[in-house]
Amino acid sequence: MLTTFMEGLLCCLCSRSTNIVVPVETSESADGYEFVEVKPGRVLRVRHIIPDRPMVEEPTGVGGSVSCKRKITVYRNGQLFIENLGERASAELKSCQNGNTEPNSTVEVEMTDCGNSTPPVSLPETKSESPTAGKDGTHERGTGGDAAAAPQTDQVQQARKHKWKPKRTVVIDCERKISACKGTHPDVALFFIHGVGGSLDIWGSQLDFFSKQGYEVIAADLAGHGSSSAPQIAAAYTFYALAEDMRLIFKRYARKRNILIGHSYGVSFCTFLAHEYPEQIHKMVMINGGGPTALEPSLCSIFNLPTCVLHCLSPLLTWSFLKAGFAHQSSKEKQLLKDNNAFNVSSFVLRAMMSGQYWPEGDEVYHAELTVPILLVHGMHDRFVPVEEDQRMAEILLMAFLKVLEDGSHMVMMECPEAVNTLLHEFFLWEPATPPQPKKESKTRPETAKARPDKPTVASEPYKVRPATANQTARTRND
């Protein structure tokens, strides 16, 4: 603690941070690691693993098609009204959520009746699913009290529609093809993006697992994190600057079908990329990403303190992160932080990262416009992100699967790597079932019925007279 205090005093006198992360001066790939210069003087460390696939590669499956039709209306009083028009999309949203989906008072979400739609698709159930899944608030909507209050709710909604004029209306109408993404498919790439204070090393278990499964995996250190360069200017750590870095990394390694996996703050960058490249993003995973709200830095935060003060408080901040980020605070979790280089950034970078989280475009409408299938993974003991925020995110998204792990916290991919890897792998292999096509059968039946009465009309032909004569002779013999 005394050493930390002296370093903080030196930081104040020199007006610069003492623990600056400097990248290795090379760009050659070694053990899957390489350094990419996204801008002059801005170098990011990237781990890129291309596994040895078999000589005979498995062809990509046909998959299924999902109708993505919804109308998003923003009223002048700040309310959001979402109407799902596609039958398959509505069925997905109703059945695949796991958790309390009670609408917020400031947002109204209307679901159309899907009684005539095809059976909804869902992910396979796993043992790691939340024990609270059976207490889903959606199961309580079928009670008699809700049925009695339904007409009143409709009247209130109609009154609000007439009273308030729409400020903005967004209509989404597209058909999205979703197929299973296997490790043997050469057109699939997995991108992993960490959050504040992390590094690509926190994905160690996931990178090793999926690379052994045959997937091409890419993970990068954000600027100032891990072994990436750490510019000593606060503007280098704004959301837009970091998002531009991730966009350049994505363009460099992207394949035809890409899957984004983000954790915490990294979820915002995944959402940004899904909006920028909707045709290239096939699926997305949000791990403890929070609710669909616009980012805005807090004015009353400990991270607004001077850098030298934060440096003096770094042992306390590390202890607080260990307590809030892990379900258990033992020597095992401490070793995980040390081995995976988590929460090991300079005080200057930490302060700039927290104050640079300004992204007003990332509101509920922005997230509601996403048509990509999304898996949400939440650690039940997470003290940074409440489960209600992920439930709210699942409610706003068009196709969302929310899974809660009872033994995990904010760093759930490090605490429960096997459970997280299983959930992610099942999601990658998932594809919507192709519905049957009864129209073809209905067309053939009338044609067969018409063909039968046509046979006696041509009885004058000689080859059709013979069976009739044979029948007549048979009758005379029986008589």
Image: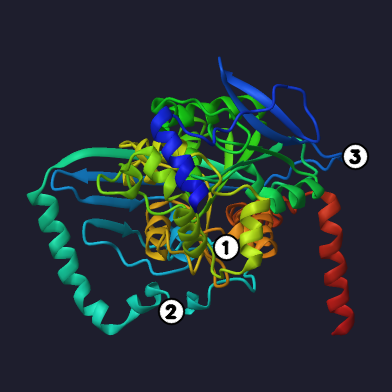
Lower sequence index among marks 2 and 3:
3
Q: Position of residue 81 (x, y in %)?
A: 26, 51
In the picture of the structure, the residue carrying the numbered disc 3 is 56
Lower sequence index among marks 1 and 2:
1
Q: Amino acid at mark 1?
A: Ser
Q: Residue at x 44, y 31 (%)?
A: 237
Q: Which quadrant of the view contains residue 24? A: top right
Q: Which mark is residue 235?
A: none
In the picture of the structure, the residue carrying the numbered disc 1 is 122
Furthest-right residue in this view: 55
Q: Position of residue 306 (x, y in %)?
A: 34, 39
Distance (Cα) linking label 1 and label 2:
18 Å
Which of the pair 44/316 is nearer the observer? 316
* Pointers 1 and 2 in contact (C-beta within 8 Å): no
Q: Position of residue 206 (x, y in %)?
A: 69, 51
Q: Is residue 213 above or below residue 20?
A: below
Q: Residue at x 46, y 26 (%)?
A: 232
Furthest-left residue in this view: 163
Q: Amino acid at mark 3?
A: Val
Residue 101 as seen in the image, left or right of residue 461 = left
Distance (Cα) linking label 2 and label 3:
47 Å
Q: Does dot 3 land on a helix, a strand or a loop?
A: loop
Q: Is residue 104 above or below residue 82?
A: below
In what quadrant of the picture does the C terminus appear? bottom right
Q: Which quadrant of the view contains residue 176? A: top right
In the picture of the structure, the residue carrying the numbered disc 2 is 135
